[in-house]
Image (tube, rainbow, N blue to C red):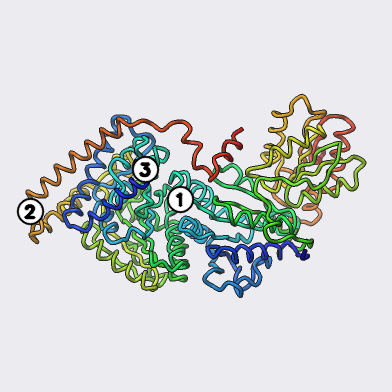
Amino acid sequence: MPKLRMRQAVAQALEDAMAEDPSVILMGEDIAAAGGAFKATEGLLEKFGPMRVRDTPISEMGFLGAAVGAAVSGLRPVVEMMFVDFTAVALDQLVIEAAKMRYLSRGRLEVPLVLRASAGAGLGFGCQHSQMADQWFRATPGLKLAVASGPQNAYGLLRAAVRDPDPVVVLEPRALYGQRDEVETGEAGIVPLGQARRASQGEDVTLVALGQMVDVALEAVARASWSADVIDLQTLVPWDRTAVEESVRRTRRLVVVEEAPWSGGWGTEVTDHVCGALFGELLAPPVRVTTPDVPVPYSGKLEGRWLPDAGYVVQQVDELLRTGRRPQPWWTEI
Amino acid sequence: MGPEGVGGRQLERRRALAEPVGVYRRMVEIRFVEQQIQVLYEQGHVRGSTHLCIGQEAVSVGVARAARVSDGVTCTYRGHGMALALGVSVEEVLGEVAGRTTGCAGGLGGSMHLSGEAVGLLPTFAIVGAGLPVAAGVALAAQVKGTGAAAVAVFGDGSANIGAFHETLNLAAIWKLPVVFVCENNLYGEYSRINLTTPLEDLAERAAAYRIPGTVVDGQDVDAVSSAVSAALGRARAGEGPSLLEMKTYRYSGHSRSDPATYRPAGELEQWQERDPIDLYAGQLATSGVAGRQELDVVRQEVQQAVANACELVLASPEPPVEEMFRHVLATRALVAREAR
């Protein structure tokens, strides 16, 4: 298996998808001649030419809308949003148009569109270029949402998204683009949407994570005195309830590790579901390890505090196991 | 009737526009349907809002006559006329407005979301300006696949001040997309007259900023509309890129069903009614000897009766079954059910 950086895995997925299906086209700012701001589309212009690999003006509403129109007309556009934050100025086309086209046409039209975007904190881009923004997408019926946690599922989720008949948002944690690992490509490397992955196996607690928090959870397990199942959800819409239930039924404790705000983060969905489905089987209340409800700070020291890290996860789980009660988040002491 | 039956009927209705009397008939039909919708609203059969296009019939029918069925069309929530013109049937339009199974979206869309994919009409857009980039995308697909098809974006003057308009004209210009932008300038963006919102009278001038042709067209003259659209489509198909056509027209009613349009200056409506698109075309047909007044009167009566019959059929048809709302959210119904578990 080739060793690829995550950005190369993305480019490989796009190359394989375009070779497989001539209706796949790429659009985005600086994705063609420059190979992408994060080099996730490098070499594709040379391989597939300017008709299928298109640099766009800085017009997110315009080109995302054009992708919607192209998708209903038989193409499979993959749009790169350089920073997911920029989707804000194009949101109508995704959540109001693309997400409702199948519904309004009663299935006569479909929108096989992929929006892939770099996302998340950790690199000092400041509060307008560091959000995950998953909450903009996951409350909209008609969309799917996947989040990569490394080179393998960056490849596999994107391949699945391109083949999917519905609009799919794929978030690529920007801080992971340089991460290098062996990547299974081709059919065997495809990661079906809606399926979680167990990244480690243990007894005492289930850690549910996503994106760059998967590595944080794994690092916490490596340091801890307890053992844990680490479930990488991989897809947020639809998320794999079965995998989470199966694990929590065994460990009887749930901790969600999120790069998401305390209020309304995606983990609320997970804890709500588990409370409803496994009430009475839990040994302790579910815990969410999240970011505080504030914008992402620029200072390296503050951004490092803002993002959950392994030490914080260990501390929260330690306290949960010791007391059987839900620990307070760190910022309540400030 | 299955989807193929519906599509076949829509195509047949579209072909009827090849004849001048067919054009007249369709404009009259749009007028009667809009009046019927007003009545249905007053009777409590229409929920939410509805937006009539009485006075603008020549634009809808002119565009439909010029476009091919393989060309994609995007249109606004003031779209009853455009849907009928393109070939969607009276039952499908009234049924959708009344939220019945006979509607083109089975009663799940409503007045603002009419569609007829067999004749190129994407579900009409209820967000101002949203249809423009989508039309550019339809054109992009035609360009990439080399199908020879084109796209038409129909939108109001209010759209000319939203970002999507400018982004799309720019994008279509640099990519030379086969798309025609048809602006229905009826002088009012919702309740505000254009001079209060826009620093120029002729929106076609905005084409110059994107180095594409911009033309002012008499939107009350159906022949003028279809000639202008045909020429622009010809240019688009020849690979010469997009055009902006500004149709000067007027809506006789307010913005939506709740708007009495008291903001209009006295006499403005009457002045436009003197150049009513249907009367104007009837006069042209009579003068050129294509159809006499008497023949057109018969057409008028036939259409009036047909609309009344369709309305009766619609009101006798049921509201959609509850399970319909769970269909067509995503490709796999199971996924929706699983999500809702």
- A236 vs B167, left or right, is right
Per the image, label 1 sits on a secondary structure element best described as: loop
Residue B25 coordinates in the image, percent (x, y) = 19, 50
Q: Which chain carries label 2?
A: B
Q: Name the residue under label 1.
A: A109
- B193 vs A148, left or right, is left
Q: Name the residue under label 2.
A: B292
Q: Which of B291 and A29 is in front in this view?
A: B291
- A172 vs A221, left or right, is left
Q: Give the CA separation, mark 3 to mark 1.
A: 16 Å
Q: Nearer the viewer, mark 3 or mark 1?
A: 3
Q: Nearer the viewer, mark 3 or mark 2?
A: 3
Question: Which mark, by number, is residue B2?
Answer: 3
Q: How crowded is mark 2: few (under 14 residues within 10 Å), some or many (20 or more)?
A: some
Residue under disc 2 on the same chain as residue under disc 1:
no
Q: Which chain carries label 3?
A: B
Q: Nearer the viewer, mark 2 or mark 1?
A: 1
Residue B42 coordinates in the image, percent (x, y) = 28, 32
Per the image, label 3 sits on a secondary structure element best described as: loop
Q: Give the CA separation, mark 2 to mark 1.
A: 43 Å
Residue B154 coordinates in the image, percent (x, y) = 35, 56
Residue drawn at 87 percent across, 33 percent down: A321
Per the image, label 2 sits on a secondary structure element best described as: loop
Three-letter amino acid code at the position of disc 2: Gly
* Image quarter hosting the C terminus of chain B: top right
Residue extending farthest to the top is: A280
